[in-house]
Image (cartoon, rainbow, N blue to C red):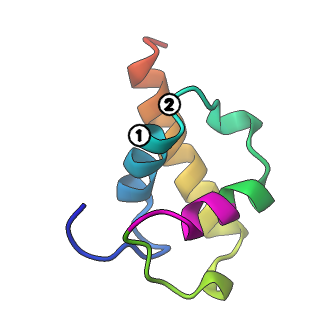
Amino acid sequence: MPGELTWDDAEDIALALMEKFPTADPLNIRFTDLHKWVTELEGFADDPKASNEGKLERIQMAWLEEWKDAHGR
């Protein structure tokens, strides 16, 4: 994945999460786990403390859209 990911890269993070956790249902992921998973992604270079509920929610919703497309929903 080119470049460095930040909390504002919701779509790119969603794609990376889909690749890393293909069977995970984004709606069943706690924000604490989502935060951990995002900060552990290869290429993530933002301050872990710079996240907030809104940013995590945007990532979750972007992931949900990718998940729906992948699962035909």
Say left or right for 72 vs 59: left
Q: Residue 20 appears at what percent x and percent y? A: 47, 43
* Residue count near mark 2 (Cα–Cα under 10 Å), binned few <14, some 14–19, many ≥20: few
Label total for image: 2
Helix, strand or loop for the magenta stretch, by majority: helix
- Residue at horizontal 75%, vertical 35%? 28
Say left or right for 59 vs 44: right
Question: What is the secondary structure assignment of the residue under circle 1?
Answer: helix
Q: Is residue 28 magenta?
A: no
User: Where 67 sits versus 38, above or below?
Assistant: above
Tell me the quadrant of the picture where the N terminus can be found.
Answer: bottom left
Identify residue for label 2.
22
Name the amino acid, label 2.
Pro
Give residue 66's quadrant in the image: top left
* Residue count near mark 1 (Cα–Cα under 10 Å), binned few <14, some 14–19, many ≥20: few
Give residue 10's quadrant in the image: bottom left
User: Where 68 sits versus 38, above or below?
Assistant: above
Say left or right for 56 vs 5: right
- Residue at horizontal 74%, vertical 55%? 33
Q: Is residue 40 magenta?
A: yes
Question: What is the secondary structure assignment of the residue under circle 2?
Answer: loop
Identify residue for label 1.
19
Residue situated in front as seen by the camera: 62 or 47: 47
Residues at discs 1 and 2 in contact (Cβ within 8 Å)? yes
**Residue occupying the far left of the picture:** 2
The magenta span reads 35-42
Name the amino acid, label 1.
Glu
